[in-house]
Image (tube, rainbow, N blue to C red):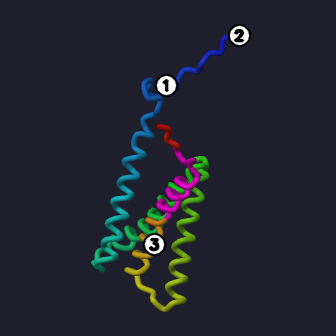
Amino acid sequence: MQTIRLKSPPSGTDRDTGRSGGTDLLPLAAGAAVAVGGVGAALALFDLDVPLRGPCTLLFLIAAPAAALATALRALEPWGRAVAAVAGALAVDVLVAQGMLALHVWSVRGGVVAVAALSALAPLLAAARHLRRRPAIRRTT
């Protein structure tokens, strides 16, 4: 019988968790991006004239739909999910802008609200699809 040896973890990782030191900062960076995006959305909604309003609002307009689409695309590998989510976020932004321009209702506030509404709708649709595919539990008593 042949014995299979397991490789030891790389020298820069924690033996208990198996994670390297750099990946511990990923949730912190994601939380910071959400906070900055939320500030950008608030600055745009309240029409405050602050120099960082444009970049923070742009971060919200990219990050909110990307995060929503990433939750809906859990079946993909991480890099593929990231690329598809960012591409989908750009498509959502462009479609919202085109729709608002075609209807002659363009406004920054309306665009932020529309993107936020679509971003909130995507995970709800994914959850509904997941619940619909799950088999019914039969109780026997």
Task: Verify whether residue 127 appears in magenta.
Answer: yes
Instruction: Identify which amino acid the numbered label 3 is placed on.
Output: Val
Residue 111 higher or lower than 29, as above or below: below
Of labels 1 and 3, earlier in sequence is 1
Inter-mark Cα distance, 1 to 2: 27 Å
> Which residue is found at the position 27% from the left and 78% from the top?
48
Q: What kind of element bears circle 3?
A: helix
Residue 86 higher or lower than 8, as above or below: below
Task: Verify whether residue 45 appears in magenta.
Answer: no
Disc 2 to disc 3: CB gap under 8 Å: no
Q: Seen from this angle, which residue lies furthest top?
A: 1
Q: Position of residue 84 (x, y in %)?
A: 59, 59
Which is more toward the observer, 122 or 84?
122
Q: Position of residue 15 (x, y in %)?
A: 45, 24
Of labels 2 and 3, earlier in sequence is 2
Q: Nearer the viewer, mark 1 or mark 3?
A: 3
Q: Position of residue 118 (x, y in %)?
A: 47, 70
Q: Name the residue tied to disc 2.
A: 2
Find the magenta span and give its range. Answer: 122-137
Q: Name the residue tied to disc 1.
A: 11
Numbered label attached to residue 115:
3
Q: Most prominent secondary structure in the magenta stretch? A: helix
Quadrant (top left/top right/bottom left/bottom right) for the N terminus: top right
Inter-mark Cα distance, 2 to 3: 57 Å
Neighbor class of circle 3 (other Cα within 10 Å; few <14, some 14-19, many 20+) is many
Of labels 1 and 2, earlier in sequence is 2
Q: Position of residue 68 (x, y in %)?
A: 48, 60
> Which quadrant holds residue 45?
bottom left
Q: Seen from this angle, which residue lies furthest front?
A: 141
> Which quadrant holds residue 132?
bottom right
